[in-house]
């Protein structure tokens, strides 16, 4: 009985160490991938003027967005910038 518990404990410790190592590798490789991607393929700079994107939105659409934000946030939210994502 004591041998079985010792064996189970050692298997558990080996499994936990293995999971810890694999998760650490996932984090390190993920951070490395993010840094390489940001270095060699950065996001393009915005060429337009700030706030120029709101010119193309109709007043009805803008009012609907503002009303939706007020409804969802209970009047605590504020629309500061609206831009179209691609």
Image: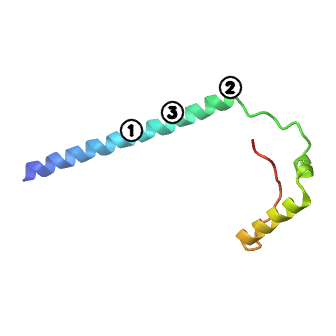
Which residue is identified by label 1? 21
* Disc 1 crowd, CA 10 A, few/some/many (<14, 14-19, 20+): few
Q: Residue at x 33, y 39 (%)?
A: 18
Q: Is residue 20 above or below residue 33?
A: below
In this rendering, would 65 be left or right of 1? Answer: right
Give the labeled residue for mark 2.
40
Distance in Å between CA atoms under marks 3 and 2 = 16 Å
Q: Quadrant of residue 74?
A: bottom right
Against 55, is 46 above or below?
above
In three-dimensional space, the C-alpha distance between marks 1 and 2, rounded to whole angstroms, equals: 28 Å
Q: Is residue 71 above or below residue 62?
A: below
- Which callout, 1 or 3, points at the residue further toward the start of the chain? 1
Residue with the mark numbered 3: 29
Query: Circle 3 sits in a helix, a strand or a loop, which is it?
Result: helix
Local SS, label 1:
helix
Position in image of residue 59 (x %, y %): 91, 60
Query: What is the C-alpha distance between the residues marked 1 and 3?
Result: 12 Å
């Amino acid at each position: 009985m004591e041998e079985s518990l010792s064996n189970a404990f050692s298997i558990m410790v080996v499994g936990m160490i293995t999971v810890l190592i694999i998760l650490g590798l996932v984090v390190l490789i993920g951070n490395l991938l993010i840094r390489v991607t940001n270095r060699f393929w950065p996001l393009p700079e915005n060429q337009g003027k700030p706030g120029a994107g709101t010119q193309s939105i109709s007043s009805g659409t803008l009012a609907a967005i503002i009303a939706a934000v007020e409804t969802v946030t209970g009047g605590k939210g504020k629309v500061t910038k609206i831009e179209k994502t691609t």
